[in-house]
Amino acid sequence: MIMHKLVLSRTFWFGIGLLLLVFFFFPATALAEGTEEYCLSCHGNPELTLTMESGETLSLYISPEMLEQSIHAAKGITCNACHAEIQTYPHPKLEYGTKRDLSRAYYLACQSCHSVNYDKTMDSMHAQVAEAGNLAAPICTDCHGTHDIKSPNHPRSLVSTTCGKCHTEIYDQYATSVHGGALIQEDNPDVPVCTDCHGVHNIQDPRLESFLIASPELCANCHADQELMAKYGLNADVYNLYKLSWHGVDVTVYKARWPTIWHESALCIDCHGVHDILKTDDPASSVNPANLLATCQKCHPNAGPNWTGAWTGHNEISRERTPFVYYTNLFYTSFTPVVLWISAIYVLLQIIRATVERGRRALR
Amino acid sequence: MNDLNSSSIADAPAMKNEKTYTRFSLSQRIEHFVLLVSFTLLGITGLPQKYPTQQWSDFVLRIFGGIESARQIHHISAIALMIVSVYHVIAVAYRIYVLRSPLTMLPLLDDFKHLFQDLGYYLGMRKHKGYYGRFNYAEKVEYLAVVWGTLVMAITGFMMWNPIATARFLPGQWIPAAKAAHGGEALLAVLSILIWHFYHVHLKKFNKSMFTGKLTREEMEHEHPAELAQLESGSNQTDPEPTMLRKRQQIFAPFAAGFALLLGLGIVSFVTFEETAIQTINRGESVAVFVPLTPTPRPTPTPLPTPEPGQGVGANTWSGQYEALFRNRCGTCHGITSVGGLSLATLEQAIKGGNSGPAIVPGDAEESVLVQVQRAGGHPGQLSADELGRVIDWINQGAPER
């Protein structure tokens, strides 16, 4: 009985609330439908500016053409979807000390529709940096824009140029790399843009041990893809062979299981470079035969000229490339079974004989 | 070897009133014990490294407290094995040179005869096995295999422990070859021990002589009848005369000491020879990570068509040289922003000029405001004398566009 009452009263209050909502906010809803035109009647004036407490001049002009081209306008999402607190004209004065304060307050509006991606950004390195006090750390609008939001990856290179707005020097390295060059000059759809390796909204600190240890797998996402690599004449076994190599076992097996291991082993990026990866036949490549020894010496400082021969490459052991290794393997793969089979047969003969002998003695 | 010959001691146990024969001296039993422990540890810590991706490898390495401590144990066991090997070489040399003991481990024609006799017995074609001497062919094969295996493991182990030194005098690919041989030999050794050794001394009959040092008379009859006959007939080798013994010992001692010192130093250098790799790789960006692009945003790149050759780049024309020159040197003000009403973005706009008149008057450099302003000097985008000279020439030639 009590329960029933409670349910009744809840429905009752809900009804009242709904009524109130309709009465109070209906004019505002009506405003929302025509907000663009309504707001632009003032904000369409290019000379409309505001001097902030910090002395910065904030342009309050919203270009109608720009607004029209934005992805939100095309979907019928208008001004007060984000500027939800503005219901009427004249609207209250906005109290923000600096442009940055304003941006950091308004970008929270993204959350109301894009909550999944917004939540991901909370785990990102950018959010950590902001939490540590660096308010210049990027927020949604720094990458996506505000009134001019468009698809972030058309053309695909837009992703990398967006990151390049702050990471200029890395962008410049990337732009000359085999990946970046193909992206920017040919709009190649196969090469990675920044976010393919670093993630999109939950970008992690790439210096973290966990990121580094997983980085060969990141490369393998493309470089172990037979079909994709065949397109460029590259060997797709490199990752699997790396995993069995001295370096690779240390990284993919031991370091992954015992992160406290006290020495480090080379990752793909330690030899090939990170943002500045070049084709191996490029004379400037760190793994070009001409530069390989110097690359090894980064970790093996005293290595001599023969040293690079110890690197069997990401190639199957073959008679042509590494005959010593090939013949050693051949010896043990043939000699070992022969020895063990002979031993086993010899031992088996003795067991049979001993069993027969015991049987005979028991019968006697 | 000598111990047995010298002492067919009647060491009668109270329980069984049976004569026993010393088979292994205490020092030999210690040697065997060190070999047993180091071999086992080497195998248990080594094979998981040969098969790193296997589940059981993970399990075994966890027991040893992880890969790093397993490697430490592997290295320490290797050192123990090397020390016991050096000791063994000296002990054998002592028995051969000082005691003149017979070389009982050498394979002889008799061993082949025994093998065929045994095979005949196992196949039921003979009534009894071969009459073995002190060491039968199965024991000799095992001993020689251990010698060979230890040599291979020590050499390949050295190459992997000191790869940089190895690559100084050998081709680099010998190092991965050493790794292959180390793993291959290890597997062969461990499996041989499990099949051959375990059957012959544990399963067939648990032979405790390696720990007690003794064999009973009955065991001798079964396993080493030829040796027993020799012992009982008294035709076995006897110790040298005491004076002779002392003389030989005096010669042997310095050689043994020198050899021990040499190999001891060898082991030390083996272990401490080199630091193969740095322990921490200095990872990081070679460039600054956060260098924001201000105030100009980077333009969205659109793939440019590959310029076709022969477009007259570098020619003494507007499009050949001056368009780019003005864009670079003047474009900040006299581009889109057209300060003073002047834009130098196109030749047409340049001829039209700004508030002070036409910037370029084709054919007449003196009348061109651009030349006048630049001659006066001190302009924010000042051309060099050489550049201005070229501009004047070009204007006087009629300022051709292309």
Image: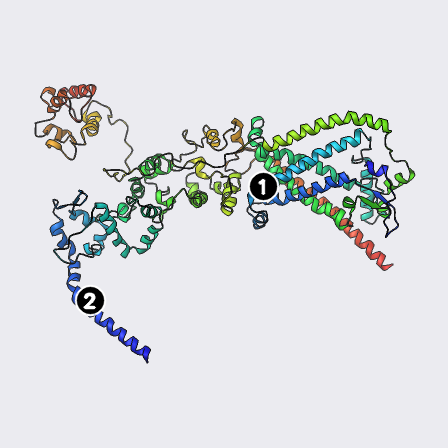
Q: Secondary structure at mark 2?
A: helix
B393 relative position to A124: left or right:
left
**Looking at the image, what colour scheme do you see?**
rainbow
The chain under label 1 reads B
Where residue A17 sits: x, y (%)?
A: 22, 69
Q: Residues within 10 Å of mark 1 (few under 14, many from 20)?
A: some
Is B163 on the left-hand or right-hand side of A55? right
Asked which quadrant contains residue B22, the reply is top right
CA gap, disc 2 and disc 1:
72 Å
- What amino acid type should be assigned to the residue bearing mark 1? Arg
Quadrant that contains the C terminus of chain B: top left
Where residue B386 appears, x then y in whole percent? 20, 19
Q: Depth check: A361 or A61 in front?
A: A61
Name which residue lies at 82% across and 39% down. B134
Residue identified by numbered label 1: B71
Q: Visible in this render: residue A89? A: yes
- Which residue is depicted at the point 21% across and 71% down? A16
* A329 left or right of A129 in image: right
Chain on which label 2 sits: A
User: Nearest the camera: A127 or A288?
Assistant: A127
Name the residue: 17% across, 56% down. A86
Q: Is residue B264 left or right of residue A302?
A: right
Q: Which residue is mark 2?
A: A21
Label placed on residue A12:
none
Could you tell me if residue B49 is visible in this image?
no
Place of residue B239 in the rendered image (x, y in percent of width and height, measured from the top left) = 86, 32
User: Could you tell me which quadrant the N terminus of chain B lies in?
Assistant: top right
